[in-house]
Image (spheres, rainbow, N blue to C red):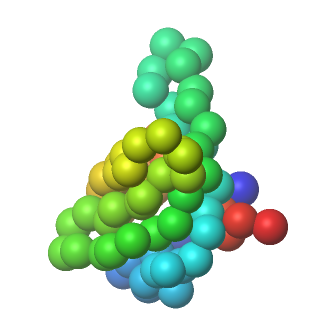
Amino acid sequence: MREQASTLDEVKSKILELKGKGVEMEVNHGRKKISHYTGVVEDAYHSVFVVKLDNATTNEKMSCSYSDILCGDVKIAKKQ
């Protein structure tokens, strides 16, 4: 997964680089509940970014804050 950045501005710039590209996400929900998602970074706003998930049946989207990445609750990497 992606290396943890040291500042919020670095995280924002890395997400902006991934905009429109496929990503793999690992989300820690706590109590040993970890979910894996794949999708495309659809948009990036001031404090959150939106990922359109790869799911053939629905058009699900997930929003995450940049601070979630700093805390380590969300890990995101470019899809290979």
Q: Is residue 19 visible?
A: yes
Q: Residue at x 53, y 45 (%)?
A: 55
> Which of the 4 image quarters holds residue 1?
bottom right
Number of residue marks: 0
Question: Looking at the picture, does residue 20 appear above or below residue 27?
Answer: below
* Front position in the image: 23 or 75: 23
Question: Would you say residue 10 is visible in this rendering?
Answer: no
* Residue 39 versus residue 46 in the image, above or below: above
Q: x, y percentage for residue 22? A: 61, 69
On screen, residue 12 versus residue 39, left or right, reads: left
The one of 37 and 30 positioned closer to us in this rendering: 37
Looking at the image, the residue that sits furthest to the left is 46
Residue that appears at 42% across and 60% down:
51
Q: Is residue 64 left or right of residue 69?
A: left
Q: Quadrant of the C terminus?
A: bottom right
**Quadrant of residue 76 within the rendered picture:** bottom right
Point 21% across, 67% down: residue: 47
Where does the image place residue 24, in percent across and percent down from the top left?
64, 55
Residue 46, placed above or below residue 56: below
In the rendering, at what x and y percent does residue 30 appear? 46, 21
Residue that protrudes farthest toward the top in the picture? 31
Furthest residue to the right? Answer: 80
Q: x, y (%) of residue 60?
A: 37, 46
Residue in the picture at 57% in, 31% down: 35
